Image: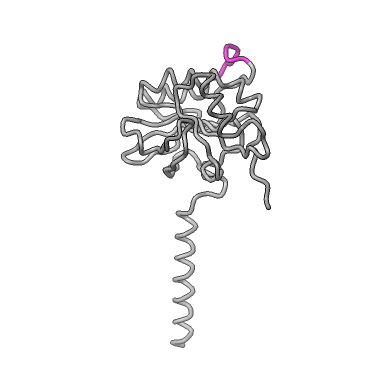
């Protein structure tokens, strides 16, 4: 009897440990709205490392997974620049991240990123996710794919995930501007009404398995 009870308690302890691990482990499909985003350090086109915690003045970030080569990313490039111009001064700068493997997507190399940022005069960091670990952690699948982060104490929590707006071809023709609406609500101290939409763009070019 004592042996049976010992076995039972041991199994319960294992179950509780496993359950705790599952509860606190990151979701396999990436962040959801309300999740805390883990900090990262990625190389900018100027050679410097950039992290979420590195900007003490940031109230949050507009994180955009994008690239040089995707037609959708190109179509949204000016809109991404406009978002930074509008919201960086209000504490929400853009962080653009290129997750593509240049072996799969020629034109998305670090050198090509540097050239693109210079030619377009990016006023925000353009970061290389060389290992693709950051894109996987976020759950990014497309370029562009947007994550609006809001600072809560020392943490950055996800407030919005998805598309920039509802027109991939013409910014002026968009009837719903998801990121701008989310930003207006956050800056007004309100909850984001539409906190998740479907990102429309090219699939991220993942590294080929050896």
The residue located at (47%, 28%) in the rendering is: 193
Front-most of residues 34 and 101: 101
The residue located at (68%, 39%) in the rendering is: 104
Which quadrant of the view contains residue 197?
top right
The residue located at (62%, 14%) in the rendering is: 170
In the image, residue 21 sits, relative to residue 202, either above or below, namely: below
Which quadrant of the view contains residue 13?
bottom left
In the image, residue 52 sits, relative to residue 83, either above or below, namely: below
The total number of labels drawn is: 0
Front-most of residues 106 and 173: 106
Front-most of residues 87 and 205: 205
Way the structure is coloured:
one colour
Front-most of residues 27 and 10: 27
Residue 179 at what x, y percent from top left?
49, 24
Residue 209 at what x, y percent from top left?
67, 50
Q: Main secondary structure of the magenta part?
A: loop
In the image, residue 14 sits, relative to residue 204, either above or below, namely: below
Where are the magenta residues, as a range? 170-177
Residue 1 at what x, y percent from top left?
46, 88
């Amino acid at each position: 009897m004592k042996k049976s009870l010992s076995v039972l308690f041991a199994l319960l302890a294992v179950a509780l440990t496993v359950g705790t691990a599952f509860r606190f482990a990151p979701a396999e499909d990436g962040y959801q709205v309300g999740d805390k985003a883990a900090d990262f350090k990625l190389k900018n086109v100027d050679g410097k490392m950039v992290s979420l915690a590195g900007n003490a003045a940031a109230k949050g970030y507009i994180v955009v997974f994008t690239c040089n080569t995707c037609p959708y990313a190109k179509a949204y490039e000016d809109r991404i620049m406009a978002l930074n111009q509008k919201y960086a001064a209000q504490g929400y700068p853009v962080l653009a991240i290129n997750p593509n493997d240049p072996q799969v997507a020629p034109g998305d190399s670090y050198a090509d990123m540097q050239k693109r940022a210079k030619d377009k005069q990016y006023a925000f960091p353009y970061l290389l996710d060389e290992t693709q670990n950051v894109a996987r952690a976020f759950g990014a699948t497309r370029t562009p794919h947007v994550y609006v982060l809001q600072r809560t104490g020392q943490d950055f929590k996800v407030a919005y995930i998805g598309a920039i707006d509802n027109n991939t071809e013409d910014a002026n023709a968009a009837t719903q501007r998801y990121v701008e609406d989310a930003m207006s609500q956050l800056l007004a101290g309100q909850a984001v009404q539409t906190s998740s939409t479907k990102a429309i763009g090219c699939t991220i070019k993942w590294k080929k398995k050896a």
